[in-house]
Amino acid sequence: SNSKVILNAEEISRTMERLAMEINERHGDCKEVAILGIQRRGVDLAARLRAALEKRLGQAIPSGLLDINLYRDDWTTLDVQPQINKTEILFDIDGKEIILVDDVLFTGRTIRAALEAILDFGRPRQVELMVLVDRGHRELPIQADYVGKTVETRRGEHVDVYLDERDGREMVCLVE
Ligand code: 5GP
Ligand code: MG
């Protein structure tokens, strides 16, 4: 299969800095901001975003994670719903401005499941979504507020996200 690099290591790094800046611009001092990453690479990206924001602001940003199990054996099999395995939120989410973080946004079903889990947990003032890649093909009315890169894909294509801390290399590829 044919693979094309759509973000290299430097571009990923610059993209994460830009997204942190956008969040900083919209949320000012970020006093109520908290970050929730979706397993697995959303958690890695959430940690990077948190570090970038904490560095900019000089203050701690609460964070947690959502573990969502995709009962799918194929990205193109869309009749099965993603389910939440575990939610680890060790701060009070009531009144918070939550930034939900994932690597790739596709049909929107994972985010729908994540929202349900978050709202079971408490009552945030706002929930926004940050993704590294939006690859289109939404099946629900869900959009990201902060997007690293929008990539036109075919349904059967796949975006491979490699992150240093997990994969030992750093790039995003589109695989035909
Ligand atoms: P959705 O639920 O929006 O259909 O799919 C998004 C979730 O599935 C994300 O958690 C993402 O990690 C994963 N996903 C969907 N499509 C892709 C893809 O092309 N590449 C990667 N790396 N993950 C994908
Ligand atoms: Mg995922």
Image (cartoon, rainbow, N blue to C red):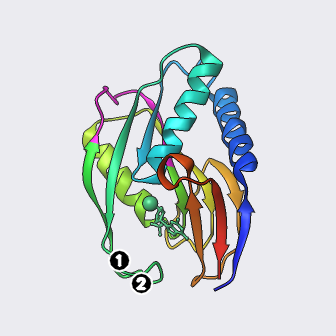
Secondary structure type for disc 1: loop
The quarter of the picture where residue 23 lies is top right
Sort mark 1 into few (<14), some (14-19) or many (20+) by Cα contacts within 10 Å.
few
Label 2, label 1: how many angstroms apart (C-alpha)? 6 Å
Above or below residue 63? Residue 174 is: below
Image x and y of residue 126, in percent: 47, 37
* Label 2 with label 1: CB-CB less than 8 Å: yes
Rendered image: mark on residue 77: 2
Q: Nearer the viewer, residue 166 or 17?
A: 166
The residue at 65%/27% (across/down) is: 24
**Which label number is shown at residue 104?**
none
Residue 14 sits in which quadrant? top right
As for residue 104 lying within the magenta part, the answer is: no
The C terminus lies in which quarter of the figure?
bottom right
Give residue 78's position: percent from left, percent from top: 41, 80
Q: Amino acid at mark 1?
A: Arg
Counting residues from the start of the chain, the first of labels 2 and 1 encountered is 1
Query: Badge 2 local density, few (<14 within 10 Å), some, or many (20+)?
Result: few
Span shown in magenta: 88-101
Q: Amino acid at mark 2?
A: Thr
From the viewer's perspective, is residue 82 above or below residue 145?
A: below
Q: Name the residue carrying label 1.
A: 72
Q: Is mark 1 within 8 Å of ligand 1?
A: no
Quadrant housing the N terminus: bottom right
Q: Nearer the viewer, residue 52 or 4?
A: 4
Residue 73 image-quadrant placement: bottom left
Foreground of the two, 56 or 120? 56
Residue 168 in the image: above or below residue 123? below
Is residue 128 shown to the viewer in this render? no
In reply to whether residue 94 is colored magenta, the answer given is yes
Q: Residue at x 70, y 28 (%)?
A: 25
